[in-house]
Amino acid sequence: MCGKIYLFLNHGVYKLDFIINDEVLEEIRQKADIVGLISEYVNLKKSGANYLGLCPFHNEKTPSFSVSPSKEFFHCFGCGAGGDVITFVMKVENLGFIDAVQFLADKYNVRLSQKTENRKEIEKRERAYLANREAGLFYLNNLYKSKIALNYLEKRGIDKSIAMKFGLGMTPISSRGLYEHLLKKGFKEEELLNYNLVIKSSKDSRCFDRFRNRLMFPIIDRNKNIIGFGGRVFDNSLPKYLNSKDTLVYNKADNLYNLNNVARESNRERILLVEGYMDVISLDKSGINFSVASLGTALTQNQAKLLKRYGKQVIVCYDGDNAGVKASVRAIDVLTNEGCAPKILHLPEGLDPDEFIKKYGLTSFEAILNKAMNHIDYKLEIEKKNANLNSTEGLSAYINRALVIIASIKNPVEAEIYIDKISKEYKISVDALRMQLGALVNYKKTPKINLKKDKSFKKADGKNMAEDQILAYALNDEDIFKFIRKNMTSIDFSNPSSRIVFEKMEELYKQDDKGYNIMLDSLINQGLINEEFKKRLNAIPLPTNAFDLAKELMTNIKRWNLIKDRDYINSCIKQAEADIENFDKNQLKMLVGKLYEINKRLKSL
Ligand SMILES: [Zn+2]
């Protein structure tokens, strides 16, 4: 019967046109009379204040399935199933939370609010993509008219097919060429200013192109949208590279140049982080299809997340000058913070990757790539270079800094090897080094979160917080997601947004774009969660022992659910005792038995 109704629903549609919010859920719960709804599936008989029937979720001969109209709640004392109308539909119709909400909204004529706001947002973004696309095409057409650009590409050995692959372009001769072109295409001045394609003179408020006299590199996302541009000069004028500022569709801290190609072409074994666009393109030309560049910023945490996702081994290949060394050390910190163990490569003789390959060949480049230094060795080396090892104070200071680096090593055997090395090199006893290291490690240890013992959490807040936490960890680490998917169901979660994220995560992990924020944005764009929920998840720190914490959180969530069941059964027992004459003795016995079982399960957690 209900299966038929269901046929008319858009099951599994990817984009929903409505928002699931608290008001909608409240209205559904109010309009859907729980006894009426469940009666469509189960033969219910009144028993005291509640209704009883045979459980639809497990095989039984004596009824242990109870529905409480006052609490708007069902519970089976046989199998432990329980919840509200939405949970019931999820279980009985075998639907996810979102589909169950849609099912009930349809059944009880609850109007789901249209996500007009969201559609406007999407249209705005699409308009920005379109303008960027037009700009990209315009630059591309200019490339073949520009002698200086073609000469430059020829000198760098970049042929037409490579130029096309990266969509290279050239700014027009006129400083208002793009501006005028896009006005003709129907874009408004204000839009072009917003997309950072055009800037306004502060003197006479005349508009002119943001990029002038530059070779243009479109920055393309993994959906093949141009989201911004980088432009390179041909002479020595500064800045050498100019990049789009952040716009509606572009956030340089969340993107890497060439990730669109790497995502498609690389086998994701290695990923090479280089300095500039031209490095990436030259490497690609030589057959190295796993390099990316950060976009005119020091490496950000989100970029580190992307690197980790698209390459098992991250290799940082910056220039060997002072700035390059500094940037490398910073990149190490950002990457290790993300759980990566990066390697560092400085090419000899101050060569860039293109020059190196030209001079020594691709095989030599592969060889030197394989010999890239691990980040601990690299940092020790840098400290050593900066230390004055001839004075006692200098040596002691160096040893201390070296131990701080070694303290960050998680593998104790590896740490021991470094201790041994330093001991031999500077003739310091291993014991003294270990003692000093022990002091550092203890100092750095952060207290482990223990929700069980921390009574300062209120129960309800604690559960919501635990749900947020476990989801944040699972969004950040697919292994954690796999673990919780195996051991939990969306019914374990009580917050609607948590349920949605849990249910959608599998689908999200199947997409090409799997960034933490990308996945959440995708749900926001579908109107399934709101910005506020994303912010809440984003505020959760991601510790290195997230997997252990996730296990603990799961136990806590299950415990809270059992406690909720126990409270419900206790209230039923109280009701039964108050109305003992009308109450079935067998049922009371069953309630007590169930209580015993829940307590046993609670103890075993
Ligand atoms: Zn049951």
Image (cartoon, rainbow, N blue to C red):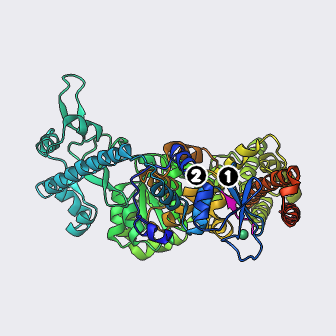
Left-right relation of 470 to 413: left
Give the main secondary structure, helix, strand or loop, of the magenta stretch. loop
Instruction: State whether residue 71 appears in this view.
Output: yes
Q: Residue at x 32, y 60 (%)?
A: 224
* x then y, percent, for residue 240: 32, 45
372, 396: nearer the viewer: 372
Instruction: State whether residue 343 appears in this view.
Output: no
| Magenta stretch in the rendered image | 79-83
Q: CA distance from mark 1 to mark 2?
A: 22 Å
Instruction: Tell me the quarter of the picture where residue 472 sits.
Output: bottom right
Q: Magenta segment: does it hold 80?
A: yes
Q: Secondary structure at mark 1?
A: loop
**CB of mark 1 within 8 Å of CB of mark 2?**
no
Return the residue found at the far top: 203
33, 312: nearer the viewer: 33
Residue tagged by mark 1? 69
Return the residue found at the far front: 581
Residue tagged by mark 2? 496
* x then y, percent, for residue 504: 52, 62
| Residue type indicated by callout 1 | Pro
* x then y, percent, for residue 250: 37, 47
